[in-house]
Image (cartoon, helix red, strand yellow):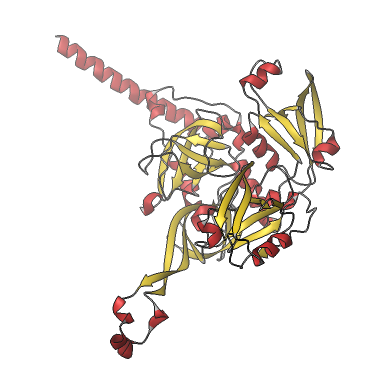
Amino acid sequence: MEGTQNMVLMRLRRELRIVSGLLLGFLAIVNGSSSASAQDSAGAGLRLVPGSAQEMKLSFAPIVKDVAPAVVNVYASRKVVQQRRVSPFFNDPFFRRFFGNPDQGLTRPQERVQSSLGSGVVISADGTVITNHHVIKDADEVRVALNDRREFDAEIVLLDERTDLAVLKIKGEGPFDFVPFAGSDSLEVGDIVLAIGNPFGVGQTVTQGIVSALARTQVGVTDYQFFIQTDAAINPGNSGGALVDMNGQLVGVNTAIFSRSGGSNGIGFAIPAHMVQFVATAAGEGGKVQRPWLGATVQLVNAEIAEALSLDRPRGVIVTNIYPSSPAEDAGLRVSDLVIAIDGKEVLDPDSFGYRFATKRLGEQARFTILRGGDQKLIDINLAPAPETTPRDTRVLTEYSPFEGATVMNLSPAVAEEIGVEGLLEGVVITEIVPNSPAARVGMKVGDIVRAINDDEIVSTRMLEGVTKVPPRVWRLDIERDGKVSRIVLRG
């Protein structure tokens, strides 16, 4: 008897679900469509969770059908020359008689092609594609494969290593399907997102998750640390792919994962759409990213500083240095001012400060909200490019020395901004190093500032080049890196 009652109850529940589904379908027809209603709700700023078993059966397929044609595969290739070992028998005079004397040694140069695979997103109908810088770094040729299997050569329009973004242009007739931008500042933790790309080269793949966190700043991938974190599965090959919201709009470009195994552990990071759009706009306005220069340095406000300033919690950044005749000085910013917001957007730390300020357009103004002496003030900063106060006088050092293979420039605000150097804006900075050169072997890095050689201050590239032409018996080098000066002692 009890078993019969249970069967009747199960049948009633099943029939009730069917009736509920028919009712929801009827309401959807009356009101337009369920997808249109969802878009209207999203447009009104409403975020809804499934309220019934029928709603749990709703699909992301309509969004994927709209977005997938605009997510592409990016193939990059470059030619490299390597030294290949040849047989030691070539050193034997008998063999040289028949085979010649290749390179008079045990190696000979061999050219081969290195290739990489990643993803990209078409962001306009003319075929403009955004991807990651590391996907096409040093590439000689780039090809783009669309979702419908068409392939095109692509032109590199802009490379911006500091944001790990690159802009391509498809060499083909459009119009092309593209994904519109969404405002990444409208995202909230818990929002559903889709990641679309080509992981491991297996073909276009869609994964779903939520926004796990916003404004992640301790990732160490780019100079501007301000990432969207998501648990949507992101794997190698997803780099440059799309992260989209439930309106099918681009909220970010997938760029990195946190993993000990090389696969997805549910911690992926995407560059926010606001930064992506900033770089894409720069590509359309001359192909060069120009960021505003503040002319000031800032420091994190930790618990001790917050207590000393009588703050209820650590927040904002404190100004530690201001350069003469800079936009910061002209606007009246002072050392020890606490910047807590830029244009109404909260500043949490130096990374979020850098992101907020660096994505502002030149020629406009940024409004800083500051605390000074317990009072809140507003200061308007004019957004201007960094000036080249000292001619850069670029020189490639070729004389035998610890600097052989390095390219150096005179520092100025403009040069410091280009290569991401902070601190004193004078001296000589290394901007490029040839791999396996003496400079590379002694540990020199791009961004190193040469402060002194054998206790003589180095003030120009001309002076540094002169020292390398008359090498001393012992090299005592004072090199500044990340604000710290270290001494290196080498034999001449």
Quadrant that contains the C terminus: bottom right
Q: Is residue 126 something that shows in the picture?
A: no
Please say if 181 is above or below 51.
below
Quadrant that contains the N terminus: top left
Q: Is residue 486 something that shows in the picture?
A: yes
Where residue 437 appears, as percent x and y from the top left, is 53, 63
Res 470 → quadrant? bottom right
The residue furthest top is 1
Which residue is drawn at the image coordinates 66% and 16% (left, top)? 307
- Asked whether, in this view, residue 489 is left or right of residue 425, the answer is left
Which residue is drawn at the image coordinates 47% and 35% (left, top)? 230
Where residue 392 appears, as percent x and y from the top left, is 74, 59
Count of residue discs: 0
Which residue is drawn at the image coordinates 50% and 25% (left, top)? 48
Where residue 83 appears, as percent x and y from the top left, is 41, 70
Where residue 380 appears, as percent x and y from the top left, is 81, 34
Which residue is drawn at the image coordinates 16% and 9% (left, top)? 2
The residue furthest left is 1
Q: Nearer the viewer, residue 427 or 473?
A: 473
Q: Nearer the viewer, residue 227 or 219?
A: 219
- Asked whether, in this view, residue 442 is left or right of residue 464, the answer is left
Res 82 → quadrant? bottom left
The residue furthest bottom is 97
- Asked whether, in this view, residue 169 is left or right of residue 390, the answer is left
Q: Nearer the viewer, residue 47 or 164?
A: 164
